Structures are given as C-alpha cells and as structure tokens.
Amino acid sequence: MKGKLYILSLLFLLMLSATVTFAQRDSVAKATLALQDQSLGAEARIKKAVSIIDRAITNAACATDGYSWYVRGFIYKDWYKNLDSQNKKSKIRQDAVEYLKKALDLFKTDTAAASKEYADVARKTLKYLGSTYYNDAGAMLDVTNYPTAIDYYDRFKECMLLFEPGYKLKVREIEFKKALATVYEKAFRSDIKANAQFYGMTETLYKQVLALDTNDWGGNYNLSMLYYNYGVDLINNMSVTEDIVVIENIQEDSKALFKKALPYALKAYALNPKKREVLVCLEGIYFSLYEFDKSDEFKGKVALLDKEK
Amino acid sequence: MRKFIAILVTLLCISADYVRMPVVQDPNSANSKIKATFIYNFTKYIDWPDKYKEGNFVIGVIGANAFYNELTGLLQKKSVGNQKFEIKNFASEEAVAGFCHIIFIPAENSSMLPDVLKKTKGKSTLIVTEKSGLAKQGSAINFIIENNKQRFELNKGNVEKYNMKVSSTLSALAIAIE
C-alpha cells in the first residue's frame, strides 16, 4: 500500500512537472505568436512579445533551454531592427547578441534535430547584427568616438566568428585598422606634443596592416607619410630662436624619420607608380634628405602625370 | 520563425568613406625654417662693432626668393638685444642700398657674390651664401648639405676682417674654412 502511494505521488509530480514545462514552452510560443500578430502595430507587437519572453525566461526551465534564449534573442533582434536601429549605442542590439550567444551555448549539448536548425538561424541573425556593428563602427570613427568604434568592431568580429568560425576577416581587418589609424594620426598631428601617444598607436596599426598584407598600397603610403610628416612637423614646430645645438638634434631626429619613410614610399611607388600622391611624397622625402637630383626626378614625374591628365 | 530570418545588411566599405589620405607637407618651408633659425643664431654668436648696435638689425635677401617671405614671417617680431629685425629684399646686387648687418645670397643668385662684396667693402656686413665653394670666395658663412643635414661652413677670416667677432660655440659647430 505504501509502495503504491509512493508511485502515485511520483506520477503526480511528473505530470505536474510536465504541465509546468509545457506552460513555460507555451509562454515562449505565445511570444513568437505575439511577434507575428498582424492585428497590432509593429511597436505594440514587439513590445508584447518582449514582455512575454522576458517573463518566461525567469522560469528555471526556460533559463536553461536553448530554444527559449533563441526566441528571446530573435525578438530582441526584431526590436532593434524595427525600433532602435538608428540608435548607434543600442542596448537592445547588445542584448540580442548576448541572448543568441547563450542559445548557441545551450544548443551545444542539445541533440534534438530542431536545435541544429535553430542554431543555424541564430548564427545568421548574429551575422546580421555583426554587420550593423561593423557599419556603426565605421560611422563612429572620429577623434571623440573611436573607443566605441573599436568596441563595435570587436563585436562585429565576435558575431562573424560565431556565424562561421572560419570567417575571413582579413579584408575588414585591414580596412578598419587603416581607418582607425587615420583617426589616431589626425589626433596626433593636431598637437604632436600633447597627443604624442597617438604617434606610436598609428605606427602600430599601419605595421599590423602590413603584417596582414605587405603589398597594401595604403598601408605603405600612409606609414611613409606618418614618418615624413612627423619629420617635417619637428622642424616646423621648432622655435626660430632655438639654440644652434638644439637645431642639430632636431635635424638628426627628422632625418631619421625621413629615412624611415623612404622604403615604405618606394614600396607604394613600386605598387602603383601612377599615383600622384606617392610621387609628391617621394619628391618631399628626397628634398628633405637634401637629395635634390632624386627630388627633381619625382617632381618631373608629377609634372608629366599632370600633363597626361 | 524562419520567415523572420534577418535581412542581411551590406557591410559598408570603410575605406571609401572614412580613410583619409594624408597630405604631404611642403619640405621647402621646413628647410627655410632651419636656415632662418641658423641665421637667428648667427646674430647671437657673432659680435658686431658697437656702432652697429643701434637702430634696427637689418638682414638683406638678394633676388626674388621665397626665403625672403619666410624669413620676414619668422623674424619680424623678434629682436637682437634692443634691435628689432628689419628684413629687406634687394632685387639684385645693384639694388643693395644702405647698411645691412647680414646679407643672404640664395643659391640661385650666387653669381652676385663678387658684386655684393664690392658693395659692402669696409662695412661689418656678414655675407651668408649657400653654394659649395663660396666660403673660399669671400662669403663669411656658407650653408652646405652634409650627411643629409643642413650645416654651415665658417670662414673666420672673412668675418674678422670686417671687425666682427665669432664666438667659440659657433666655431665649434661650424665646418671651418680657411
């Protein structure tokens, strides 16, 4: 008798547990239905879905269920896309990414066939969100907002690698580093004494670009220009009343920079001999090194190029 | 849920919109700055006779040359002791008039050196040139390029024979020419 009672209690608990689980799954289903409810406007529809899924996820069963997080991430993605995409600092987008990451994490141990499909959609959604991060990173590349741009670029990379672990980032990496370097360079040249730290940061980025692709024209040209312009700046920023000993030191420092600039400018020239910028750059470098014959040679090439146009 | 699959956005090309091409700075202005700074230092390390320590400190530049404008811009608010700088431009050696503490003959006008020397004979005028060999032909200081740097030759004899004195600091930094 005692044994029968125990079995009945166990069955009751199992039924209760199944009912609760079903109710939780039901909430998730209700959230997806709310998202599709065409009787409501976009904002009302999304807010309703968000409210349901946020409540559902507080249940223990949903909190460890990949599908629930997947739905939550998806709803948040829709929320961002429809109502918050103009907000470059959107917290909703960030939440969507976190929820989809959580879903993918939970799907790893889920052997159900449907989970693989959901994981696939989650990855594609992350790709979409990653792309928006990349575009916003580009839009925020300026002297004030560059830390956010870096953060967004890192989020873009994370999303793309979640979308496809072997995703080829090299082209984007080069593009972003060069763009960021020009921001650093602008900050540096606006005040080479107060913003001295930006010089090394710019140099590092261009060297990273060239490590990724030694034949990148912009990387070679921009690095040569960084050195050359800094060398000229050192002289131009010198006071005319500076002592004669100091002039010697400044000339020595500038000369070292002009010499550093030369191989990168020559490489850029070898990669594209018809680029006016690099011809002017070489004319300037050789002039600054007082190699006037070579400077005149490139001056002539500039004139010839201008004549051809 | 599938029908909600995100519409993929196109990745914008950052390089087109955000990468700026650096602008090449003019190397001429940097070279002018170095020469102007040297010339300013010559006024510190060369001593003119007392009678030249009144009025403006006059520097003449021979010929139409961008350096005249650069020098004027850099020195117009500076002075040597109580003497304010006055930069004059002479179209040719013929036009050299009045007294100059320093006369600068740019490289392209080097052939005018003999006539400038005639014009300034007996005066304490420091003749500064910038062509190889001119320190041996009468100029006191001659700018040269050595080891990719702007340097200067000093012919002490050509300074002292016009009653000017050269400090040991300047002599030590110069390439001595006799």
Image (tube, rainbow, N blue to C red):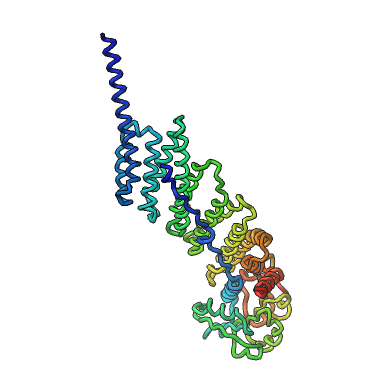
Q: Residue A44 location, x and y as percent? A: 29, 49
Q: Which residue is depicted at the point 66% across and 62% down? A: A272
Whether A287 is drawn above or below A72: the answer is: below
Left or right of B5, for residue A204: right
Looking at the picture, tell me which residue is in the foreground, A84 or A255. A84
Q: Position of residue A92 (x, y in %)?
A: 36, 48
| Quadrant location of the C terminus of chain A in the rendered image | bottom right
User: Which quadrant would residue A305 be assigned to in this image?
Assistant: bottom right
A34 in relation to B104, above or below: above
Q: Residue at x 40, y 35 (%)?
A: A66
The reply to whether residue A217 is in sight is yes
Q: Quadrant of residue A65?
A: top left
- Name of the residue lying farthest toward the front: A39
Image coordinates for residue A5, horizontal then vertical, percent: 26, 13
A64 and B116: which one is in front?
A64
Viewer-side residue, B161 vs B129: B129
Name the outermost residue toward the top: A1
Quarter holding residue B149: bottom right
Does residue A15 lie above or below A291 as drawn?
Answer: above
Residue placed at 33% from the left, 48% from the top?
A38
x and y, in percent, of residue A299 in the image = 67, 72
Q: How many marks?
A: 0
Q: Is residue B111 left or right of residue A199?
A: right
Is residue A150 in view? Answer: no
Residue A20 versus residue A148: which sits nearer the camera?
A20
Image point (32%, 46%), residue name? A37
- The quadrant the N terminus of chain A occupies is top left
